[in-house]
Image (cartoon, rainbow, N blue to C red):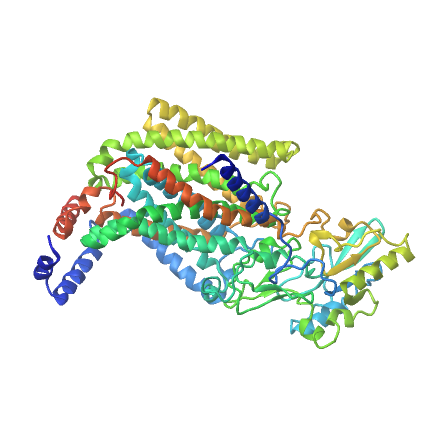
Amino acid sequence: MTGAVIAAERPSLREETKRFVRFILSELRPKGPVLTPFNLITGVIMLTGAVLLVIRFAFGLGSITNLSQDYPWGLWIGFDVVTGVAFAGGAYVLTFMVYILHIEKYHPIIRVTVLNGFLAYVFYAGALLLDLGRPWNVVNPIIGNSFGVSSVLFLVAWHFMLYMIAEFLEFSPAIAEWLGWRRVRKVLAGLTLGAVIFGITLSILHQSGLGALYLMARDKIHPLWYSEFIPLLFLVSSIFAGLSMVIFEGSITHTVFRHRAGAALRMGHAGIMTGLARICATVMFVYLALQLLVFVHQQRGAYLTTGWGAWYLLELVGFVAIPAVLFAMASQQGRQGLIKVAAVLTLVGIVLNRLNVSVIAFKWYAPVRYVPTWMEIVVTLAVISAELWVFRWVVQRMPVLDFALGHGGPQRVAEVGTVSARSVA
Amino acid sequence: MKRREVVKVLCAAGATAAIASRPAQAEDGTALVGARDTVGVLVDTTRCLGCRMCEFACAEANGLPTPDINEEIGPDRTTGPERFTAVQRHETEAGPVTVKRQCMHCLQPACAAACLTKAMLKNPEGPVVWRSNKCMGCRYCMLSCPFDAPKFEYDSAVPRIQKCQLCWSRVSEGEQPACVANCPAAALTFGRREDLLDEARARIYGAPDAYVHHIYGEHEAGGTSWLYLSAVPFDQIGLRTDLGMTGFPTYTKEFLYAVPLVLTLVPPFLLGLSRATRRHGDEGREG
């Protein structure tokens, strides 16, 4: 087809805009029933969270949080940001396997994983803004009037921002397909490899950077959790944290959005899960070996007999070693149920590890310990709920789980829209 | 490429890495090393009466609420957003000792290295100051400070990081910090840090039995502008003796040096790997 022919066929700009607006408006409408238990519960949580945030911004952080002079960082940083970003690590690991190593087996889940990673960064790293005391100054490290280049947080902040752009680019072909913009899609698809390479590099640095944040808190974190190797341990654990999240989220998506999944994903799902389980097991054994090295190197033996020692062993044996063995067994025998169990145990272990470093073993000697308020927990749940709503909205509309949905141009997409609307209803 | 050339390239790469990993010294307002003319204060805890005149003077000079005169002064009293200095009373092997606490104004402040907007700044003259127009309230300075000096106004919608600023507006006009000027027992001495160290050594030398032979802050955490003398071991008067002699920014330097290496070496490696594993007909399959 030549350019002249396209120009002749092209409707006027006004009609085109009208059509585009109509399409967007139709897509904004909910698909499927509105009054479901999930919607009601998450809706109430989000409304409560919104009210709490109004109070927080009107009266200061102290009005709804238990943060103190001893504990400047609590649940919102320790869980939302530090743990959430580790969970989002699946995107950089999978883009590495699919676009760098060209392992086609994992291609069907690449879009959903990148989408999940992108939304996790937008919402969980975005939760950082809720925690900032003076958020109106958030542009200072960006616009260049005061670069604190000696700060690890400066690095992490920039990398969060750049990585969000990289992940958006990685996902953008799906958006272009949804809108039926074939030429734009071609340009965006050309950027994918660059975005992937950039994204993996940034991920290596900020996954470890989140650990490096705690390097100057060396005298505040219990010696069983503090070491100069925190950055490396955070990086290695983000690999199996991310992949376990992919397994966990994949098994839910596979059931809830089954009607949106393409043939490739339906056929390959079990094989993908088994493969990921095997990778998780391998990386977890490497991680355990690293932890053992640190344990010996720092002469941590004496602490093992204390209560903190028991807590430490629970984290490393109960929620790293045991799920690693379960992953290995399950992947060998192809037992899907066991893989899910191992993934959940691993995720609990990551929550424990990140919270131990950032909150639980932080200022372990303090007379008054930090425990989050119910309001901090509700705001965290509200952030998660909002992310799930956006995720659902995108998966219901864009070619995320089935690439074939996206390759047919606007009419095809419209058809797909009605089909999926029907199947949900 | 000839073998000799390969060796040359490898050597060059090694040398570059060696230069990059050489520990750099202080610059850019986050740290000071070996600067001789920074100001500081010497606290002689053997002279302190625990009268808390320093607290009252500090509150007046900084527009803070007047301290409660009847307050019990225990060992756990800390500074806060409305109290930049706090006198503590510790039970020690030599009876009760009162100690004035405040920001130590480190030579290599962890807070300034942690600050991603340079709101916390080490003034070349000595004080570590906080600038409201830069700070975004992330509180990473509080997490990093080994002395827990920066305090945050949790109950304000426009919160500030609050701590001792070494009365910088007074000092720059040639006056002494309010606490020093109002100490009736001459327990506090304001001056150039090098002179204060000489003075402290002279006091230990003049009365070797009256002092522990150590100046707290000379080397702790890389050195601080506030220096302490004591008759009893410093851990008995609430000063942390496990902080080491290294400036805290050093602990993150190795990680930060790795950043440009990773940024320059990983992308070409990934690109090469992607090209090497690509099969025919894979082009255009992105997305």
Which residue extends farthest top?
A333
Question: Which residue is nearer to you in this view: B192 or A46?
Answer: B192
Residue B196 falls left or right of residue B155:
right
Quadrant of the rendered image containing residue A7: bottom left
Give how far across and how far down residue B161 sits, in percent.
58, 64
Q: Is residue A246 above or below residue A1?
A: above
Q: How many marks?
A: 0
- List the single residue furthest toward the bottom: B173
Q: Is residue A393 left or right of residue A373?
A: left
Residue at 71% over, 73% down? B171
Q: Is residue A233 visible?
A: yes
Q: Residue at x 49, y 35 (%)?
A: B3
Closest to the observer: B88 or A350?
A350
| Location of residue B271 (image quadrant) | top left
Q: Is residue A165 left or right of residue A349?
A: left
Location of the N terminus of chain B by quadrant is top left
Location of residue A95 in the rendering, given as x and y in whole percent from the top left corner: 35, 41
